[in-house]
Image (cartoon, rainbow, N blue to C red):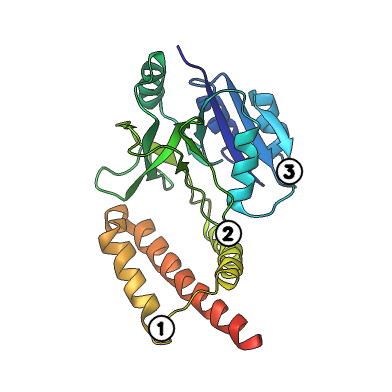
Amino acid sequence: MEKLSVYIVAKNEETHIKEVVISALKVAEEVIVVDSGSTDKTKNIASKAGAKVIFHKWKNISAQKQFAEKQCVNDWVMNLDADEVLPPALQTEINQFMQNPTADACKLKIGDMFPGYTKPRKLGRTYNIVRMYNQKSAYMPDDFNNDRAVFKVTNPKIHQFKTVVHHYSYQGLGKLITKLNTFTDAIVETMLKKDKKYCPLRIYIEFPTQFLKYYFLKRYIFNGYYGFLVSVIYAFFRFIRLAKYKEAIRKK
C-alpha cells in the first residue's frame, strides 16, 4: 500500500479546519497545514486535530501551495483546501485506490455546501479537477494564481473518484465579499505582470454575461436562494476584477 500526504493552505479558517484535518487523516499518513498568519484559532485547532502546522509568509496562492507540497514526505500527495471535507464514501474510495495505485493522478469532484445542506445538491454545480497526484508525475507550479498541478509526463493516466468532496466555501455574505475582494487584488497583480489585454467593451457586458454563466451554465440555479445570491456576487467580482485592472492601467 502506498502512503499519502495531504497538504492544506490556510489563513483564518477556524470554522471547518478541524473537520477537514480529521477527514484527511482517514486517508493520509500525514496532513500538512501551511498557515500564512492566521489571527484566529486555525493553527491551534489544526494542530490539536493531528496536522503538522507550518508558517510560511504569503506570496501568492500557487507559491504557497508549492511550498506546502515540498513539505510532504510521500510521493503521493493531495491538495485540499481548508474548507473541503472528504466524506466517508470518498475516504473508502481513496483508501482502496492507494492499495495499488494504477494512475499518475486522480480527479476529485467538488460540490458546494450551503447552510442546511447535508450533501451537495445532485444537479448543482461541481468542478472536477486533479487534486491528488504522484510527485514523480506532476507538481504544483509557482505561477501567481494558478493552483493546478502540472504534469511532468506525457499522456498521464488519470483516475476518477466518484464521491463528491463537500466544499464549505460560503461562510456568510460579509466573509465571501471580503475574500473575493482580496482575491481580485491578487488577480489584478498577476494581470499587470503578464500584461493582459482585454476588449474595452467587455467591462460593460461582464456582469450580465457572468451572472448568466454562473446561474445557468454552472447550475447555481439548482441551489435555490444561495445559488442566486452567489451568482450575483461572483458576477459582480468578475466585473470588479476588470474595473480594478482598467483603473490600474490608467494610473500607470
Give residue 66's position: percent from left, percent from top. 60, 42
Using the numbered discs, state the Cα–Cα distance from disc 3 to disc 2 in whole angstroms: 19 Å
Q: Amino acid at mark 2?
A: Lys
Q: Which mark sits nearer the N-terminus, 1 or 2?
A: 2
Residue furthest front in the image: 154
Disc 3 is placed on an element classified as: loop
What residue is shown with label 2? 179
Q: Earlier in the sequence, mark 3 or mark 2?
A: 3
State the residue position of label 1.
199
Q: Residue 32 or 74: which is nearer the viewer?
A: 74
Q: Residue at x 32, y 31 (%)?
A: 161
Residue shown at 58%/59% (left/top)?
179
The answer to whether 119 appears left or right of 180 in the picture is left
Mark closer to the observer (3, 2): 3
Q: Residue at x 35, y 63 (%)?
A: 228
- At mark 2, the secondary structure is helix
Q: Nearer the viewer, mark 1 or mark 2?
A: 1
Q: Residues within 10 Å of mark 1 (few under 14, many from 20)?
A: few
The picture places residue 200, in percent across and down from the top left corner, at 43, 87
On screen, residue 131 versus residue 60, left or right, reads left
Label 1 element class: loop
| Residue 13 visible in image | no
Residue 24 at x, y = what percent?
52, 27
The residue at which mark 3 appears reads as 56
Amino acid bearing label 1 = Cys
Given residues 216 and 118, the one toward you in this image is 216
Sequence-first disc among 1 and 3: 3
